[in-house]
Amino acid sequence: IQSAIRFLAFLILAFLFLECRSTSNQSNNHKAIPIIDIGKQADNREIEYLSKYSTNIDYIPLETCQEGMIADALYTKMRIHDNKFYFFSPTSDTPILCFDCNGKFVKEIGVKGRSNNEYIGNIWNVIINTDNSDITLIEKSKWLVYDSTHSYKQTLQINHNNLNPTEAYYLRNNQYVYLNRGNEKEFYFNKGRINNIIEDKLIIIDSSGNNLQTIGIGYQFIANTTDANTISSPSIIQSHLFSTDDKITIVSNNDTIYELTSTPVLLKPKYKLN
């Protein structure tokens, strides 16, 4: 019996030692990540003047012509590459509109239709390959690729379930990354309440549309009840994907801001949000 007691005591001490060591490592890792205190910063807001970052501002009026009319200016997005502006709207089925650096209309990119080299619905996103100037038009069912002369090149049938690339960017070496929001899944809580969850993922694909890597970011909870008349509404923020200064940043829904490293493709924590 005494031997058993000694052995049990040894196991308890070993467990406590490992737990303390794990807690210490977690504490050190947590301290290594800078914390952004949103509440404190909100109380100490300062005006940032554009003159701090630029010395000259030029206004570029866009050419007014029948082919170059922007259908939905409120939701129009823009991409800039090789001294050209590319406009598109996720709420409109108009093609990509290309203007040069002086605002002169160049051409439309993309044709709406039902063939393999045409897009069916709205243009969700546009990606520009900064290595070879390929332009990828994204809709939900497929991605249409155009070369540097804006001529049709190929169609990518993305091999991924629940495709919903709301935000997508060129990564490197003819690889692309996009944020995928899956379909809602039921999640059961106590007291009979039912909530739905949506998992946010980063998907890495090659130039042929093959899935190279999937990185889970977190879950978004959708408030719901068994009452059919109750309208669902998000209970926490969604994850978002950004690209600035050739760096891809992920603002997750778990209060952490990550940077996506390219070699290897990993999520590196950059900031914690308080």
Image (cartoon, rainbow, N blue to C red):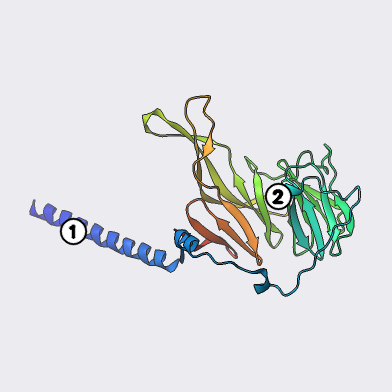
Q: Nearer the viewer, mark 2 or mark 1?
A: 2
Mark toward the start of the polypeptide (2 vs 1): 1
The spot of residue 32 in percent (x, y) is 43, 68
Residue 209's tag is 2
Type of amino acid under label 1: Phe
Residue 10's tag is 1
Q: Residues within 10 Å of mark 2 (few under 14, many from 20)?
A: some
Q: In the image shown, does 126 or 40 lie closer to the viewer?
A: 40
The spot of residue 41 in percent (x, y) is 48, 63
The spot of residue 104 in percent (x, y) is 89, 59
- Above or below, comparing residue 18 to residue 203 in the picture: below
- Above or below, comparing residue 268 to residue 155 in the picture: below
Q: Residues within 10 Å of mark 1 (few under 14, many from 20)?
A: few
- The answer to whether one can see residue 214 in this image is no
Identify which residue is drawn at 68% across, 50% down: 210
Marks 2 & 1, CB-CB < 8 Å contact: no
Secondary structure found at label 2: loop
Quarter of the image holding residue 249? bottom right
Residue at the limit of the structure toward the top, as seen here: 228
Type of amino acid under label 2: Gly
Q: In the image shown, does 272 or 110 lie closer to the viewer?
A: 272
